């Protein structure tokens, strides 16, 4: 840089206004923190070593030093002492991983908390990732008396040791009393994995906007899980987003929906819900709720959640009037297993379910056997059923024809105050076949009338081309507890 003819001497990027250069810095942010020569590098550190001007910019921008990631053993405490000086009392985010606690773990946990606590009033988010229980206790003890007026997000995850579940005897030892002698007036988002949630809903339920829980209880039935969700929603009336992720191994219920069903819980403010678990658990949860502001159902990875056909009767009661996308699935694959004797009884409620969805834009059927009873034209050919529907997808379904799909398209074009179908997609008719034979005329007509697609791939391609990802911009993503500046 010292030579007059050095190529970086007249670097045009340095002529940019700082506001513009700041945007360039953020776009180059090395969020993954690539490991080079055995060391993990932070983008602002890299930028501060380019030239004197960039170093000054980096040091004068507190937000560049607002992410403290303790994911090395031993933790690099001296580095973050320097970062706190550069923060200049700006708000910051902390992620504490399990790596610092492979040896001398309690000692490291206490050292990390001693570093953070003098600045706790500026803490914006804290995520503790799958640490041993003894480490979590150290962290929670330090936070019990703290006042954190800037804290907005909190994530606590207990170490997983083999099974997905935490024995009840161990759960009883976990005393989760967050800030019970302190104040956190800005706390709006909490995620708990393997920890009891009762204290959170009791003390923060009135103010929470986002709450995600991953209980690891043993021997939970679908009805147990549905009842748990109902209790949480009743204690958190202002909740906007809720996630429930039970263990993959759970007791299966003999009935798809309890008889008599659980009393329906109404929640007026919930806008997003994320659910995993077995199909009986999902059915049970959906059939126990009325959520007038919900627009779609998602799983933990933000992929559309499939509802079983037993949910059709509940959908017909109108609990989700704002729904814009719906995926219905028969749990059995007709060509692999015996036909479900209740299939016809479930489909009897299809018409009333679709009549209760006035805002629906996209409808997907998965593994459904329509039994050649013309359910599609009976329901979708009526002005009362889904007047705003534009996308229709059939994923490995049976018992219908392309001629019936053509009749649906034609019928909706003739109806007043009903949107015409824009896209019709058929995935994987049956193993070894990709098309319905003998329907060439209907196939040609559909190809000219709408965006008609026949695709033999029913895997990840479908999730990337569905309505929510293409039109609504809902993309699969993990939970991030800290933001770039």
Image (cartoon, rainbow, N blue to C red):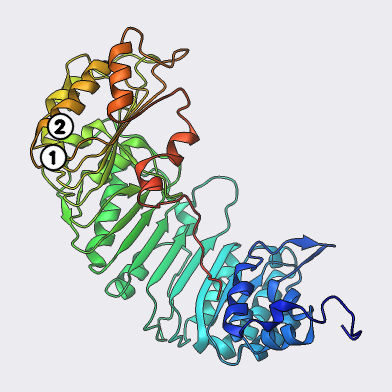
**Which of 168 and 307 lies nearest the eye of the viewer?**
307
The answer to whether 260 is drawn above or below residue 127 in the figure is: above
* Residue 227 coordinates in the image, percent (x, y): 26, 51
Which quarter of the rendered picture does the N terminus lie within?
bottom right
The answer to whether 218 is drawn above or below residue 171 in the figure is: above
In the picture, the disc for residue 418 is 1
Who's the residue at 53% across and 70% down the image?
A: 482
**Between disc 2 and disc 1, whose residue precedes?**
2
106 horizontally vs 267: left or right: right
Q: Please, which residue is most extreme toward the right here?
A: 3
Residue assigned mark 2: 412
**Which of 3 and 361 lies nearest the eye of the viewer?**
3
In the picture, the disc for residue 184 is none
- Disc 2 to disc 1: CB gap under 8 Å: yes
Q: Kindly tell me whether residue 4 is visible in this rendering.
A: yes
Who's the residue at 62% across and 86% down the image?
A: 61
Q: Name the quadrant containing residue 453.
A: top left
* Residue 14 coordinates in the image, percent (x, y): 71, 81
284 horizontally vs 106: left or right: left
**Which of 131 and 433 lies nearest the eye of the viewer?**
433
Q: Kindly tell me whether residue 398 is visible in this rendering.
A: no
Which quarter of the rendered picture does the C terminus lie within?
bottom right
The answer to whether 118 is drawn above or below residue 7 in the figure is: below
Q: Secondary structure at mark 2?
A: helix
45 horizontally vs 471: left or right: right
Q: Please, which residue is most extreme toward the top here?
A: 438
156 horizontally vs 384: left or right: right
Q: Secondary structure at mark 1?
A: loop
Give the CA distance from mark 2 to mark 1: 6 Å
């Amino acid at each position: 840089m010292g030579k007059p003819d050095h190529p970086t001497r007249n670097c045009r990027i340095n002529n940019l206004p700082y506001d513009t250069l700041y945007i360039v810095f953020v776009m180059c942010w090395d969020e993954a923190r690539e490991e080079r020569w055995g060391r993990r590098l932070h983008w602002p550190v890299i930028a501060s070593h380019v030239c004197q001007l960039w170093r000054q910019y980096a040091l004068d921008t507190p937000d560049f030093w607002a992410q403290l990631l303790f994911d090395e053993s031993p933790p690099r405490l001296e580095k973050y002492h320097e970062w706190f000086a550069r923060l200049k009392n700006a708000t910051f985010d902390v992620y504490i991983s399990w790596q610092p606690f492979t040896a001398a773990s309690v000692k490291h946990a206490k050292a990390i908390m001693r570093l953070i606590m003098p600045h706790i009033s500026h803490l914006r988010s804290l995520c503790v990732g799958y640490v041993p229980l003894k480490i979590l206790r150290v962290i929670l003890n330090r936070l019990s008396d703290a006042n954190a007026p800037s804290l907005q997000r909190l994530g606590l995850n207990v170490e997983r040791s083999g099974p997905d579940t935490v024995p009840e005897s161990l759960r009883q030892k976990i005393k989760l009393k967050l800030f019970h002698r302190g104040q956190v007036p800005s706390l709006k988002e909490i995620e708990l994995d393997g920890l009891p949630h009762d204290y959170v809903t009791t003390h923060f339920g009135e103010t929470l906007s986002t709450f995600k829980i991953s209980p690891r209880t043993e021997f939970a039935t679908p009805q147990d899980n549905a009842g748990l969700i109902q209790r949480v929603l009743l204690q958190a009336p202002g909740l906007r987003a809720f996630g429930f992720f039970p263990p993959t191994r759970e007791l299966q219920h003999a009935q798809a929906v309890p008889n008599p069903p659980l009393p329906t819980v109404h929640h007026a403010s919930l806008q997003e819900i994320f659910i995993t678990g077995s199909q009986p658990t999902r059915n049970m949860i959906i059939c126990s709720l009325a959520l007038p502001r919900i627009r779609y159902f998602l799983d933990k990875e933000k992929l559309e959640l499939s509802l079983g056909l037993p949910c059709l009767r509940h959908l017909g009661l109108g609990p989700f009037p704002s729904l814009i996308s719906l995926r219905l699935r028969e749990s059995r694959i007709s060509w692999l297993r015996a036909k479900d004797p209740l299939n016809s009884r479930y489909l009897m409620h299809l018409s009333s379910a679709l009549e209760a969805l006035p805002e629906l834009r996209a409808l997907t059927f998965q593994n459904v056997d329509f039994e050649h009873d013309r359910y599609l034209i009976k329901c979708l050919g009526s002005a009362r059923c889904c007047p705003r529907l534009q996308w229709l997808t059939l994923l490995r379904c049976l018992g219908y024809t392309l001629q019936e799909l053509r009749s649906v398209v034609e019928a909706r074009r003739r109806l007043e105050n009903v949107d015409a179908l824009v896209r019709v997609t058929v995935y994987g008719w049956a193993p070894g076949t990709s098309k319905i034979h003998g329907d060439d005329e209907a196939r040609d007509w559909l190809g000219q009338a709408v965006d008609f697609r026949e695709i033999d791939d029913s895997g990840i391609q479908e999730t990337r081309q569905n309505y929510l990802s293409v039109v609504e911009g809902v993309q699969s993503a993990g939970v991030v507890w800290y933001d770039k500046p």
